[in-house]
């Protein structure tokens, strides 16, 4: 995360089929914590997933937005 930011990409998208969310690494999308009223696909262009630490929930957002990102890493 970037200090001072509250919004970060977390690797989810529905780019293949609208409304069918998946993770970019191919793992099962079996948990979600959407903000109230989300995902809403505003102006039919929101197909990536961000977490907003200001309100601690998920939002669908525009892929063109420049946000920090959070990655997963396998620990051995």
Image (tube, rainbow, N blue to C red):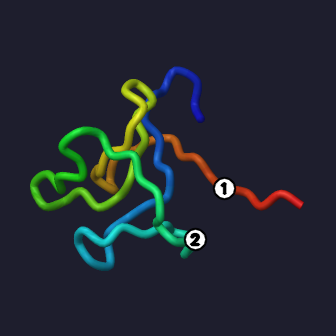
> Which residue is at 29% across, 40% downward?
35
The alpha-carbon separation of the residues under discs 1 and 2 comes to: 9 Å
Q: In the rendered structure, which disc, 1 or 2, sits on the residue that comes first in sequence?
A: 2
- Direction bottom: furthest residue: 16
Q: Is residue 17 left or right of residue 76?
A: left
Judging depth in this view, the residue of 48 and 57 nearest the camera is 57
- Compared to residue 56, the image places residue 43 above or below, namely below
> Which residue is at 45% across, 29% downward?
53
Residue occupied by mark 1: 72
- Compared to residue 43, the image places residue 51 above or below, namely above
Asked if marks 1 and 2 touch (Cβ < 8 Å), the reply is yes
- Direction right: furthest residue: 76
**Residue 41 image-quadrant placement:** bottom left
- Direction top: furthest residue: 4
Q: Quadrant of the C terminus?
A: bottom right
> Which residue is at 24% across, 68% downward?
19
- From the top left corner, tell me how far across and down residue 4 is, in percent: 52, 21
Q: Secondary structure at mark 2?
A: loop
- Compared to residue 54, the image places residue 11 above or below, namely below
- From the top left corner, tell me how far across and down residue 21 is, in percent: 36, 67
> Which residue is at 58% across, 31% downward?
2
Q: Is residue 52 left or right of residue 25?
A: left
Judging depth in this view, the residue of 2 and 18 nearest the camera is 18
Q: Residue 25 got which mark?
A: 2
Q: Is residue 15 left or right of residue 69?
A: left
Category of crowding for the residue at label 2, using alpha-carbon neighbours closer than 10 angstroms: few (below 14), some (14–19), many (at least 20): few
Q: Secondary structure at mark 1?
A: loop
């Amino acid at each position: 995360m970037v200090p001072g930011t509250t919004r970060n990409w977390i690797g989810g998208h529905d780019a293949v089929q609208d409304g069918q969310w998946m993770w970019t690494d191919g793992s099962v999308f079996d948990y979600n914590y959407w903000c109230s009223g989300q995902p809403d696909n505003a102006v039919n262009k929101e197909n990536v997933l961000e977490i907003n630490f200001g309100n601690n929930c998920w939002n669908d957002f525009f892929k063109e937005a420049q946000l920090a990102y959070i990655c997963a890493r396998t620990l051995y």
